[in-house]
């Protein structure tokens, strides 16, 4: 089975709990320790902290930028580059970047967040991706369970946890099962 690519989505601004940045860094660290490629929207805030944690854990990081070029990434969007090993410049702005970001991942984890994070969540949910929510991190992540309840679409493949390491383990297990099921279906189709 090839290497898992797990995205970390979350607030790029400070609307989170006081410990959210530290916990986001822990998410990145534990993903790296499990040999997972950490994918982000190559932005500030929680995704930046997750990339920093992944690098601390010896991992590889991929950033999906809304910009068309490095210059635009830094000058127009004013986004960092420090903890990203590979950047894909989309040139699609934030909403287009969000779609490519989510579709580039086997699973996605959500920490805090605002409307952009909610947009990424709905893409992941509609795509039936395994999803992890770091609870008590502030922002939209604190309301995902309520949104799922009132939307009457079921829970999908969504797991919740307050502990970064435990959440990483849950999401990796879901992602591995998802990939295994997809591989079995592909083999069955090849035989048919």
Image (tube, rainbow, N blue to C red):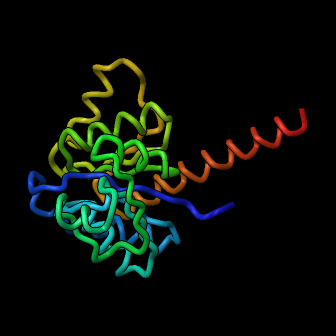
Q: Quadrant of the C terminus?
A: top right
Nearest to the observer: residue 116 or residue 68: 68
- The x, y position of residue 155, in whole percent, is 41, 30
Image-quadrant location for residue 48: bottom left
Q: Is residue 175 left or right of residue 99?
A: right
Is residue 66 in view?
Answer: yes
Question: Residue 35, percent across and down?
Answer: 52, 71
Q: What residue is drawn where x is 41% and y is 55%? A: 7
Number of numbered discs overlaid on the protein picture: 0
On screen, residue 53 versus residue 157, left or right, reads left
Residue at image coords 37%, 63%: 63
Residue 20 in sight from this viewpoint: no
Q: Is residue 4 above or below residue 140?
A: below
- For the point 45% across and 76% down, the residue is 59
Which residue does the image show at 46% across and 53% down from the upper left?
A: 170
Question: Could you say where residue 12 lies in the image, as x and y percent from the top left?
Answer: 18, 56
Give the percent coordinates (x, y) of residue 74. 21, 67
């Amino acid at each position: 089975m090839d290497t898992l690519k797990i995205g970390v989505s979350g607030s790029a601004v400070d609307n989170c709990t006081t410990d959210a940045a530290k916990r986001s860094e822990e998410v990145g660290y534990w993903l790296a320790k499990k040999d997972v490629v950490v994918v982000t929207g190559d932005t500030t805030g929680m995704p930046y902290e997750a990339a920093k944690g992944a690098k601390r854990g010896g991992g590889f990081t991929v950033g999906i930028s809304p910009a068309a070029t490095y210059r635009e990434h830094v000058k127009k969007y004013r986004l960092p580059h420090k903890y990203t090993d590979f950047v894909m410049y989309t040139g699609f702005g934030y909403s287009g970047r969000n779609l490519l970001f989510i579709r580039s991942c086997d699973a996605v984890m959500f920490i805090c967040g605002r409307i952009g994070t909610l947009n990424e969540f709905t893409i992941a949910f509609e795509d039936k991706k395994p999803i992890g929510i770091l609870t008590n991190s502030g922002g939209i992540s604190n309301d995902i369970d309520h949104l799922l309840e009132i939307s009457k679409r079921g829970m999908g493949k969504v797991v919740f946890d307050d502990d970064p390491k435990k959440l990483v383990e849950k999401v990796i297990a879901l992602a591995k099962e998802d990939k295994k099921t997809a591989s079995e279906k592909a083999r069955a189709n090849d035989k048919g």
